[in-house]
Amino acid sequence: MAHWVLCFWAICLLCFFNLGRISDVKPKDPLLLQSLVLFLWILDCVHVALATHGVYFYLVTHYGEATIILKPVWSLIVIPVVSSISNLIVRITFAYRLWKLNGRAVLLHVATDILSLCVAGFAMFFSAKGLSVSTWSELHHFNWVVYAGFISEMTINIVITVAQIVCFRRLRVTVRGRSVDILLHTLIVYSIDTCFVTSVCSVMDLVFFLALPGTLLYFAFYFVISKLYFNAMLANLNARTSLQDNFRHSESSSMESHIFTKTLATVANATDK
């Protein structure tokens, strides 16, 4: 339980750090983006509350009852719904940024949105079936939903990451300057790290689901996935100000400064609505 509580604490810090430094971001974030961050934080609070209720139900309320672990509790069954909504919003936000950075490429935007909706649909279907079963083992009749969901999730992670890297490398070729290279290299590393961490967590979740189907160990990894997505979004938003601050303290020519600022604004403003 401690690992997702720590993730929640980190997300709270990043969220309020982002909202607290809105005045430092130029241009300022639109109200829609600020509201979106706040809504995602509320969803994350609900996610933690549901997970805490599930753990409390098994380990405190029904402590010592060996057979109770065989029965699913409603709070754990509902978690995929909350997670899928949160992840869907984050993925669409990244897809929207890619759409603007890639010259409003409709095909890429539509593909990422469809895959994101598929992942959310599979998660909600799994939760709907989970509310109608009496034991965890009955859920294994719907393993195909889990497999399809994980395949779709891995695919969307790869698509978004590859599209971001290609876009940033294209900017790196067209816009010259040492500071611009540093900026785009940092953004590429962010993209790779985001995909790598979320993909590893998803793979571990699937591995434990296949290897230990009679346990709930796979939930430990599933609980963290939505927090990793939200954390990635907050890190991208907060990085704008830190990159600007670091550049102000570096020694660069006025022309390079102009190019750097213009490039950073292009990438940052792609998140705006």
Image (cartoon, grey):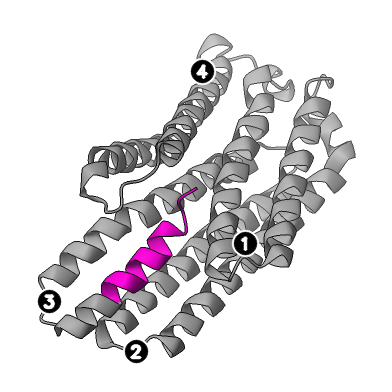
Spatial CA distance of label 4 from label 1 is 33 Å
Residue depicted at x 58% and y 19%: 58
Which residue corresponds to the image point at 52% horizontal and 68% vertical from the top-left? 101
Q: To which residue does mark 2 refer?
A: 176
Q: Which residues are magenta?
A: 260-273
Q: Residue at 62% x, 54% y: name it.
A: 202
Q: Is residue 88 covered in magenta?
A: no
For residue 157, the mark is 1
Q: Secondary structure at mark 4?
A: helix
Q: Amino acid at mark 2?
A: Arg
Secondary structure type for disc 1 = helix
Q: Earlier in the sequence, mark 3 or mark 1?
A: 1
Q: Secondary structure at mark 3?
A: loop
Q: CA distance from mark 4 to mark 2?
A: 56 Å
Q: Which mark is residue 56?
A: 4
Residue 144 drawn above or below residue 36: below
**SS of the residue under disc 2:** loop
Q: Residue 200: where, in percent of width, then height?
A: 56, 61
Characterize the magenta stretch by its predominant secondary structure.
helix
User: Going from the N terminus, do you reach mark 4 or mark 1 first?
Assistant: 4
Which amino acid lies under the numbered mark 1 shown in the image of this protein?
Asn
Left or right for 39, reference 14 = right
Instruction: State the CA–CA distance, disc 1 to disc 2.
Output: 29 Å
Distance from disc 4 to disc 3, alpha carbons, whole Å, reads: 51 Å
Whether residue 150 is visible here, answered yes or no, is: no
Q: Is residue 142 above or below residue 25?
A: above
Q: Which residue is mark 3?
A: 250
Q: Amino acid at mark 4?
A: Tyr
> Looking at this view, is 35 or 119 the one in front?
35
